[in-house]
Image (cartoon, grey):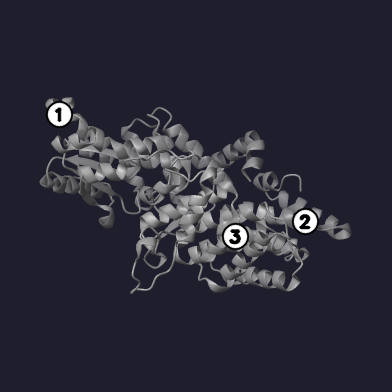
Amino acid sequence: MWDKVAAQAGPIAGFLENQLRAGFQPAPQVEIAARKPAHGVRPVPYWGTLERVAYRALTTAAVADLDPFDRSPQTYINFITEPGRYARDRQPARAQNRLGEFFLFLESPVKYVVKSDITAFYQFIDHAVLANELLLLGVNFELIEALMELLAEVQGRNYGLPQLLDASDMLSEIYADRIERDLLRSGFAAWRFNDDFRIACDTYADSLAAIEALDAAARRVGLVLSEHKTVTVGIVKYILDALGLSPSEAGQAVNLDDVEDIVGDYTDDFGKEDADAAYDVIRKAEVRSADFVVGPEEAHSINLSSIRGEDVRLLRRAINGLTLAGDARAVDEIVQLARYAPSLTPNLMRYLRTIGDQCEPQDDAWDDIIEAVDRLAGEVALNAWQNMWLVDVIHDLGLLSRDLGDEEAAKRRAEWVDDLRRDTENEALRAAATRALAAQGLISLTSVIAAADRTSDALLHFYTSAGRECAQLLTGIEATEAQKALTAWAKSSKLHGFLLGDS
């Protein structure tokens, strides 16, 4: 989609400007609940093309004169290690002449580090507080007003920022900075990365005071600390835990709200040359009974029946490493991992897609992928978000095509996808299922257009893609009639025309 938008950047900007001048009526967002490592969920919003462009433009203009923020992997590493550097720098001068730098931390007055973050940070950012903060920073009032109105109209509420968008990262940084400033003004040695905080303390009493101060600062802006992630650790243990962190090969920016749960995605990756080690991690992950006795061989393996946050991070890194290497050995483990570590679904589906793209139908790995997909659809309880990822894999690998050789299996998959389309209450999943069916001619173009007309334009890119793929399969008089329908659909608005392109 975004390649089409980028190619038409000028005309789209002009169209959007006219819409804004005329009184832009933004399409409401569509949300889907992503699974988190434990039992929680995180809402993932879908915004329409015009809404996203307007949001990014207004935010960029609003923060243009403010200090830029940096959420690179290296910045996170610096954040993690800063309390240790602070403790080292506060050592008595006589300690500098002794051997063994690490053990000199025992002579530092810094004895504890408070670790904490904010519960559902993006979801509960108060628009009124954010607007006031922007105003105090000298941002143009009309820009602030337009930005807050857009957020409220698209989300249907006066709080919260949509996650996974750069504009939200910019605004959330301004919001969280207010909490950090409160701590620094109170004299605490505090550091922050997004909504993640570290506070260095000399005594345990100081750490209690730091937690209370952080909690009060968060509550003043309508937020609360994550109770199970607010802990006090000794400085030596903290330094041991932080040792060896380094940026990942991928080098991607960090912009999710739950930094601790994704640390493994951008530190200490398994590279292409580490495929054996990555596979070993996955192969040794197992489901254990409550009375299982852990022996020497299982001491460093993962128990999927009581999986921990660090286990999820390690598995994520291992799956990403095998994806990078194009190593198919873990395909047989995908179903079990999806069942016991549902937050890994995006990584698992990307892995299946990558391996599938490099396979031929006669390869054993291809048969393993098909078996994994069918078992996920038939045996594993998946929520709408997980089903959406699975449907995308089915679409991308063409697993609804009867040309694969097993017409009965393709028919069963098509029925499963069609049942999702008909029965789901989630509009995003319905759109993904429609596209998968349309790509194989299993739903008519008129049905695609009718479904798009009933749905928020936040999902228009799904339906225009479905329409194009459906029309490309047709020949003769059917192709002619489909082209007429696409042309008429494209004239619904400039946006429709941009997304349908040269159909």
**Amino acid type for the residue under numbered disc 2:** Ala
Label 3 or label 2, whichever comes before in sequence order: 3
Q: Residue at x 36, y 56 (%)?
A: 309
Q: Nearer the viewer, residue 77 or 46?
A: 77
Q: CA distance from mark 1 to mark 3?
A: 68 Å
Residue denoted by label 2: 471
Sort mark 3 into few (<14), some (14-19) or many (20+) by Cα contacts within 10 Å.
Answer: some
Q: Quadrant of residue 440?
A: bottom right
**Amino acid type for the residue under numbered disc 3:** Thr
Label 2 or label 1, whichever comes before in sequence order: 1
Mark in the foreground, 2 or 1: 1
| On screen, residue 234 above or below 474 | above
Q: Marks 2 and 3: in contact by CB < 8 Å?
A: no
Q: CA distance from mark 3 to mark 2?
A: 20 Å
Secondary structure of the residue carrying tag 3 is: loop
Q: Which mark is residue 477?
A: none
Label 1 or label 3, whichever comes before in sequence order: 1
Residue denoted by label 1: 95
